[in-house]
Amino acid sequence: MKSFVKKSPHWALCLAAVAGAAFYWGVWATDRYVSETNIVMQSSELNSTGLNVASLLSGTSGAGDLLLLRDHLLSADMIIKLDKEQQLRQHYSNPDIDYLSRLSSADVPLEKFITYMHKRIAVEYDDYANVLRIQVQAYNPDMAKKLAELLLANGEQHMNTMSQRLAAEQVSFIETQVANLAERLHQARQQLLDYQNKNGMVSPTGTVQSILTIVAQLEGQLSSAQARLKVATSYQSASSPEVVRLKSEIQALQQQIALELKKTASSSGEALNKISAEYQSLELQANFAMELYSNALSALESTRVEAARKLKQVSVLQYPTQAEYSAEPRRLYNTVVFAIFALILTFITHLAIWVVRDHND
């Protein structure tokens, strides 16, 4: 034996390492229990071409949501929260756990604690099945299941809160716009009413149209009177009562037409054409404010519907399992793998030594 160790110390070291590994994983290593849970992200969103405000509610979905959830579950905030609720440091630093597996102490720095917990909590995204698989290792089955349940509950609460906050912010933004547009509409209508009251007209445009209709009627009567006067002068003298009456009628019609036209246009500043133009401008502003307000109300209802569709829910495919036996460490597997790599490394070392010796000879 001494001769073997002296001639091949690397092989002796290899056998000692394999024996040590077999002892550690076969006898010394503490059992770890694993609880598993699988979740997916579901949304009530439906494909629709009708109410489309996707630009207001854009965000990640599907794989993106699951990856966000994975980062949250592995975040320092989550681990700190679990530690406060379940005293993780005390559990994983229990002196009954073997030295190589346990947390070195309950007061290790946060960075080391998080690194250690990342070895005991695995959250992997299965891109083929679009499923998030969570595995929690602990030194008793109840603790493993409890941690998995807490991860599941906190993850669901976080995603729902984030989704609801996004929807609420979008709806709140549209509601603010609706309120502003409602105030704008109220002001435009009030300006229109004040202008109507100031000028004593409900519709200056309608008044102008009425005057123009009267003028057209008067011009028709004037043309008829002028025709009758022409006929009368052909067989009567200029001083005949009929001719005098027709001339007086024509003069009165002309004066009335001039008076009516003066109402619609003058340089005094109170002409109906100016009043009508100003009224049309105010009416256009009121109609535009009404259209904006109507569109905003429609957008608000659409946004509320889209917000409800965008709400996401964490659905559990497999609830946290209760371990009945320790799944970790994989004693035989770890021992065999270690032995294979140790033998390969020792064999390479042996070949290197043999080549060097042969070269020296």
Image (cartoon, helix red, strand yellow):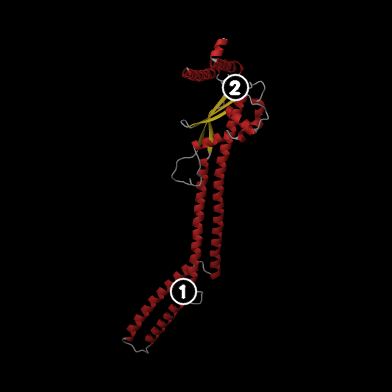
Viewer-side label of 1, 2? 2
- Identify whether 186 is placed above or below 55: below
Q: Residues within 10 Å of mark 2 (few under 14, many from 20)?
A: many
User: In which image quadrant can residue 120 be found?
Assistant: top right
On the rendered structure, is 137 left or right of 243? Answer: right
> Dot 2 lies on which element?
loop
As shown in the figure, which amino acid type bears the numbered disc 2? Arg
Q: CA distance from mark 1 to mark 2?
A: 97 Å
Residue 209 point in image, percent of width and height: 44, 69
Picture residue at 56% right of the left edge, 13% below the top: 6
> Dot 1 lies on which element?
helix
Residue 321 point in image, percent of width and height: 56, 24
Q: Nearer the viewer, residue 339 or 177?
A: 339
Q: Quadrant of the N terminus?
A: top right
- From this viewpoint, which residue is outermost toward the left? 234
As shown in the figure, which amino acid type bears the numbered disc 1? Thr
Picture residue at 60% right of the left edge, 15% below the top: 27
User: In which image quadrant can residue 180 be found?
Assistant: bottom right
On the rendered structure, is 210 left or right of 10? Answer: left
Provide the residue designation for mark 2: 32
- Identify whether 104 is placed above or below 45: above
Q: Nearer the viewer, residue 241 or 66?
A: 66
- Identify whether 19 is placed above or below 121: above
Asked whether disc 1 touches disc 2, contact meaning CB atoms under 8 Å apart, the reply is no
Provide the residue designation for mark 1: 264
Q: Nearer the viewer, residue 31 or 131?
A: 31
User: Which is nearer the N-term, disc 1 or disc 2?
Assistant: 2
On the rendered structure, is 177 left or right of 225? Answer: right
